[in-house]
Image (tube, rainbow, N blue to C red):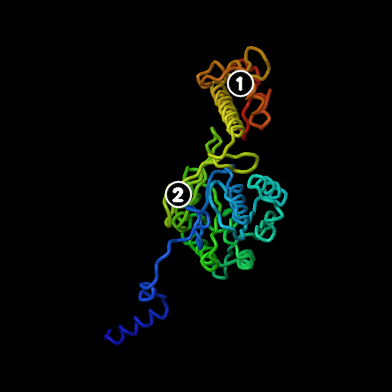
Amino acid sequence: MNSDEGLLDYAMADSVLPTLDLSRLAQEKPTPKRFIIPNFVPAGEVTLFTGPGSAGKSLLAQQLATAKAGGKSSLRLDLNQAPAIYLTCEDDEQQLHWRQYHICNALGISMDKLAGVLHLTSLRGELDNALVELGPHGELQPSPTYERLAAVVRRTGADFVALDNVAHLFPGNENDRGEVTRFVNLLNGLAGETGAAIMLLGHPNKSGDSYSGSTAWPNAVRSHVFLEHDLQTDMRTFKAEKANYGRNGDSIRFAWVDWAFVHENDLTPDMTKAIAAATRMNAENDAFMRCLAKCTENCRNVSHQPGSNHAPKIFAGMPEAKGIKKAAFADAMERVLDMGWIELNVELWTDNHRHSKRGIRATDRGE
């Protein structure tokens, strides 16, 4: 290759690949990345938001969208007012209304004041709610649902978009790095074009990782937040798992109070008392199920009826009880029965004399 051909190649490369104008940038003061949710969710990016089932990801996403649309502080996060979107594939209009009523009460904002700035959408029951589909050559391409979403983001000027959740919106292989990256890049393109923060809700995997599928998900995004749920105290922690534009490890602790989340430092004495009571009952429920599992393992049938094998009396004397008394176990038995964790007076096994043993058994929900 001669020198002229080399210069031609470089010229062609410059015409295809955009490069920064360093001369211009040298005259301008750089600005840091803007955050829509301070320290957690950057503008113009896709943020992966994961957490275990029932931790409250959907509620938190709807609450943040409400606070953003209303210009209200939530969980001690100061949010500038701007349109926001919360799209769910799992909850219907009735459930959205139920949550919205309680969120508005907690934030002190009238629901009608959010008309035109908070956009709640349910795709539950729709068969084609994936944001990508296979093209003629097997490649992923934007779907009609994506085009509908993009049109709403552009029309409303939404600053914050929560998409609930990835299992419904991404039909590809979550372990395929290429497919995951193309899906995230599609959403990053929309986020970059509009300046919106897109928060994509997902579940962790069963191995204990904070994301499902391969490492493609956390590698494909520049921001990943996680919601922890302490089942004993019922407290939640929202923390930055990956923060390329901020500090890793930033976190907020809060509690569920009447269908909304309240920062731990904003809990009233009555709220704190109620949470302490819930914590105690959760511990008693867990101890009841732990003792029942041990008795079942040892082929020791226990009953809800008073007598020699009365479950609360037997459980109170077991090491697994950890000091919980008979009366507390009696209350716990009623609670776990009401929750469907146990069933009563069912046949458990047959002993050596072919006598049928009956008693309390844990259900699939209680295991």
How packed mark 2 is, by other alpha carbons closer than 10 Å (few <14, some 14-19, many 20 or more), is: many
260 and 354: which is toward the camera: 260
189 and 115: which is toward the camera: 115
What amino acid type is highlighted by mark number 1? Ala
Q: Is residue 311 visible?
A: no
Mark 1 element type? helix
Instruction: Tell me residue 278's x, y (percent).
Output: 60, 31
What amino acid type is highlighted by mark number 2? Glu
Give the residue drawn at x 65%, y 57%: 118
What residue does disc 2 label?
241
Q: Is residue 340 left or right of residue 318?
A: right
What residue does disc 1 label?
328
Q: Quadrant of residue 25?
A: bottom left
Give the residue drawn at x 39%, y 68%: 29
137 and 325: which is toward the camera: 325
Q: Quadrant of residue 350?
A: top right
